[in-house]
Image (tube, rainbow, N blue to C red):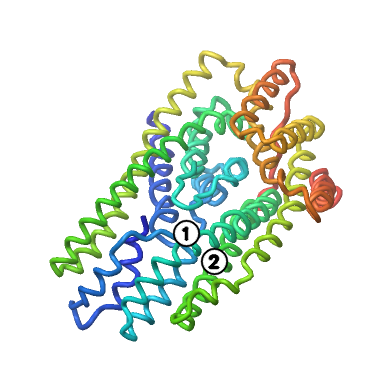
Amino acid sequence: MQGLGFFFAISPWFKLEEGEYDTKALKRHLVYFNTHPFMASYLLGVVARLEKEGNPAGAVRAKENLMGPLGAAGDGLFWTSLSPMVVVLSLSVALLSPLAGILTLLLVHNAIQLSVRWNLFKRGWENAYDPLTYIGGRQDRKVGARAQEVIAPLSGFLLGIVAFRTETPGTVLVLFGLSLILFMKGWSTLRIMLVILTIALILGGLGIRMEMPWFPLR
Amino acid sequence: MTGSALPLTATMLLGGLLTLDRMAFGQFFLSRPLFAATLLGYILHFPAEGAFVGLVYELLFLRSIPAGSFIPLHPLHGSLVAVFLIASGSAGTSGWQAVPVAVFFSLPAIFLDRYVEIFWRRSNERNLLKATALVRMGKIGSARGVHLLSTLRAFLLYTAAVLVSGVILSGFCTFALSRFPSFTAYLSVAGLTPFFIGLAGVTAGRKYGFGRVGFLCGLLLGALAGSGILL
């Protein structure tokens, strides 16, 4: 998994002099490691400080005990909340201007993730002797819930702008509504896709077509 | 095929390079379809079509997340192949009409992408063992080199995967459209289905609190913007 990456990131820390490394310390960290990639910075901070201050057992223990909870916290905060919010926001902007859309995607996402990474590295260093307390006190769930709430109006905007840039907004809204109902009933994406594709092909066969939405290019 | 050699080269190189963003480097979102497809669209002179392909793929796979050690379907290669199908003319028509056809025929590329990722992860586990052996021998520089070599291998592997997807799917697309020329017209509705489904997936489950009202307000604003009243 990410063991090789963690080893690559931490290895300059164990450099003794030109070309010489603390081999024992490196061996300790060349093991299985899997967490959320952005949250790994916290463990880098913890491990760097504990190793520097001569507590290798504590560094290994912190890594083993925290990679799971950090992975779960990162998945909840980023993959299901902040990242979808940034993507839907960027898609809404991209419908007005593709270039502005990709700039929004890169700038907003990277501003968030780089600041979180740097902040977590610093916090890891500061809380190296009690790493769990800081992680337990973070408000990741609340931030995630707020981000999820922002997704709803953005999705509505996206649907509205696409639907009303086609010749047949009614067909778009009806097919969207049907997909939404099926999702809420717990149908899988594949099953819904097959049903909607079949309906869409029948509509196409009956001569009911949709023009693709247009983009003003800037 | 000569006419599509340059677009294919650009597609495979971009596919290999941008995959590294999600595999080995900073996860800066350079591997997101919105960025990748739009960028390839700009390179191949179809920026608006590229952006719309990116939009459809983004929405369709927004719920596909790499939680824990689960390997989800990743939309990068599919979106790039879709833009390639548009630029190479394999999608039969040009411009907007080609978008639904290209999205439809490019979808299988995501399955090859996942297969390659599983293969690469296994090879990475072997690299970890190799690096451990090198550290035991005190060859730290070589052990760090294994990480870089693994990154290079990922680039080559994914470049090859995009090449295979691009060649097979463009051939299949051209063949299917030559046998069933009316398919393009049928797909004019069907090509947008990933968009509805993706958007519905994003919206479903957000039924509490501010969600419904927010969605309707957004829909109204979008309708006003889309019909040219607001923007």
Tell me the tag on residue B27.
1
Q: Which percent across, then down, holds residue A189? A: 61, 34
Residue at the extreme bottom of the image, as rendered: A53
User: Is residue B2 shown above or below B116?
Assistant: above
In the depicted view, which residue is nearer to us: A141 or B203?
A: A141
Q: With A138 as the anchor, is B199 left or right in this view?
A: right
| Image position, residue A76 (x, y; %) | 58, 58
Tell me the SS state at disc 1: loop
Q: Quarter holding the N terminus of chain B?
A: top left
Is B54 located above or below residue B139 in the figure? above
* Residue on which the image places disc 2: A113
On the rendered structure, is A165 left or right of B101? Answer: right
Q: Nearer the viewer, residue A58 or B96?
A: A58
Mark 2 burial class by Cα count in 10 Å: few <14, some 14-19, many 20+: some
The part of the image, by quadrant, that contains residue A51 is: bottom left
Residue A15: x and y in percent read 25, 79
Q: Amino acid at mark 1?
A: Gln
Q: Nearer the viewer, residue A46 or B6?
A: A46
Q: What's the residue at 76%, 45% (across, down)? A: A161
Q: Residue furthest left?
A: B137
Q: Where B158 falls versus A69 (above or below)?
A: above
**Mark 1: few/some/many CA within 10 Å (<14, 14-19, 20+):** some
